[in-house]
Image (cartoon, helix red, strand yellow):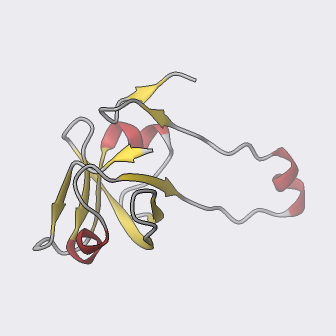
């Protein structure tokens, strides 16, 4: 439940995300991400760009048309696993506070 902090229509595209959040979630720079906008129901794919700004969640380029500042979004990534690995896999979940700062769960 990240809060969108800015939208930049004139940017080339993607979603800029606080690099600490990316590290905690094991999201690599330019990794494909799925974005689910809780506020308006939009769902889209884009890629993540690390941001130096604490708490930043910026919709860029075409993605900027799918949300507004203050919208709540969920970001998801996926991995392909064989059957053995699937049984041992534990998804990584990162929860944030109202300022997009990681909360300890």
Rendered residue at 35%/36% (across/down): 20
On screen, residue 100 versus residue 81, left or right, reads left
Rendered residue at 65%/62% (across/down): 79
| Residue 30, image x, y percentages | 37, 64
Q: How many labels does the image show?
A: 0
Q: Which residue appears farthest toward the top when viewing the image? A: 104
Rendered residue at 21%/74% (across/down): 61
On screen, residue 87 versus residue 56, left or right, reads right
Quadrant for the C terminus in the image:
top right
Nearer-the-camera pick, 44 or 18: 44
Q: Which residue appears farthest toward the left when viewing the image? A: 10
Above or below 60: residue 52: above
Q: Quadrant of residue 53?
A: top left
Above or below 85: residue 81: below
| Residue 22, image x, y percentages | 40, 45
Nearer-the-camera pick, 78 or 38: 38
| Residue 74, image x, y percentages | 47, 53
On screen, residue 89 versus residue 12, left or right, reads right
Q: In which quarter of the image is residue 47?
A: bottom left
Q: In which quarter of the image is residue 14?
A: bottom left
Quadrant for the N terminus in the image:
top left
Nearer-the-camera pick, 62 or 98: 98
| Residue 44, image x, y percentages | 44, 73
On screen, residue 105 versus residue 39, left or right, reads right
Rendered residue at 52%/37% (across/down): 94
């Amino acid at each position: 439940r990240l809060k969108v902090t800015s939208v930049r229509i004139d940017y080339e595209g993607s979603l800029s995300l606080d690099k600490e959040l990316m590290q905690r979630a094991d999201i690599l720079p330019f990794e494909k991400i799925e974005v689910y906008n809780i506020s308006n129901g939009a769902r889209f794919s884009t890629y993540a760009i690390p941001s130096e700004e604490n708490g930043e969640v910026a919709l860029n380029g075409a993605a900027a048309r799918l949300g507004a500042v203050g919208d709540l979004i969920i970001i998801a990534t996926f991995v392909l696993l064989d059957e053995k690995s699937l049984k041992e896999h534990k998804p990584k979940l990162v929860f944030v506070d109202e300022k997009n700062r990681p909360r300890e769960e």
